[in-house]
Amino acid sequence: MASRAAATKLPSWLDPLRKWAYNASGFNKYGLLHDDCLYDYDDVKEAVRRLPPDLLHSRNFRIIRAMQFAIQHDVLPKEQWTKFEEDVRYLQPYLDEVRREQEEKDEWDKNH
């Protein structure tokens, strides 16, 4: 959510460009959220591991559904696409926490 707040500090004239880029990416046509598409680095894997069960199940459902539609060379009906305004960065707080912990660990290792 912090990244969404930071992104909203961009000039308002960029909003149409941001929405265009969001829609052009294509993941929203499968019902995916931005955080569903993050590359699985170690910090992302750890953040996903820390998700509450309901968020984890929702994420897994969206990913499996998207894979099924991709295999079928199809997309969701347009009314089910994820809208730019509805996209939630649900993984960001956990990712920030993992990165802060890693920085703290690196600092500790460097000084001891």
Image: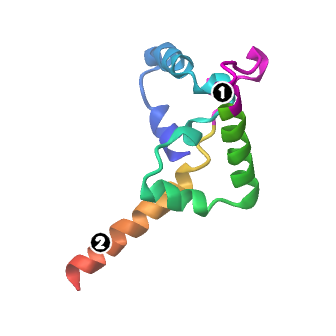
Q: Amino acid at mark 2?
A: Asp
Tag nearer the camera, 1 or 2: 1
| Residue 83 visible to an observer of this rendering | no
Check disc 1: other Cα within 10 Å, few if <14, some if 14-19, many if 20+: few
- The residue that appears at 70% across and 20% down in the rendered structure is 75
- Provide residue 59's location: percent of width, then percent of height: 68, 46
N-term-proximal mark, 1 vs 2: 1
Residue in front for this viewpoint, 101 or 8: 101
- Name the quadrant containing residue 79: top right
* The disc label shown at residue 106, or none: 2
Residue in front for this viewpoint, 73 or 36: 73
Q: Secondary structure at mark 2?
A: helix
Left or right of residue 78, residue 49 in this image: left
- Residue 110 among those drawn in magenta: no
Mark 1–mark 2 distance (CA, rounded to whole Å)? 42 Å
Left or right of residue 100, residue 33 in this image: right
Q: Residue furthest left?
A: 111
Q: Residue 85, relative to residue 50: is it above or below?
A: above
Q: Residue 55, relative to residue 28: is it above or below?
A: below
Q: Amino acid at mark 1?
A: Ile
| Residue 44 visible to an observer of this rendering | yes
Q: Which residues are magenta?
A: 68-87
Q: Secondary structure at mark 1?
A: helix
Q: Residue 97, relative to residue 19: is it above or below?
A: below
| Quarter of the picture holding the C terminus | bottom left
- The residue that appears at 48% across and 19% down in the rendered structure is 21
- Provide residue 50's location: percent of width, then percent of height: 60, 63
Left or right of residue 10, residue 5 in this image: right
- The residue that appears at 51% across and 22% down in the rendered structure is 25
- Name the quadrant containing residue 54: bottom right
For disc 1, the marked residue is 71
- Name the quadrant containing residue 78: top right
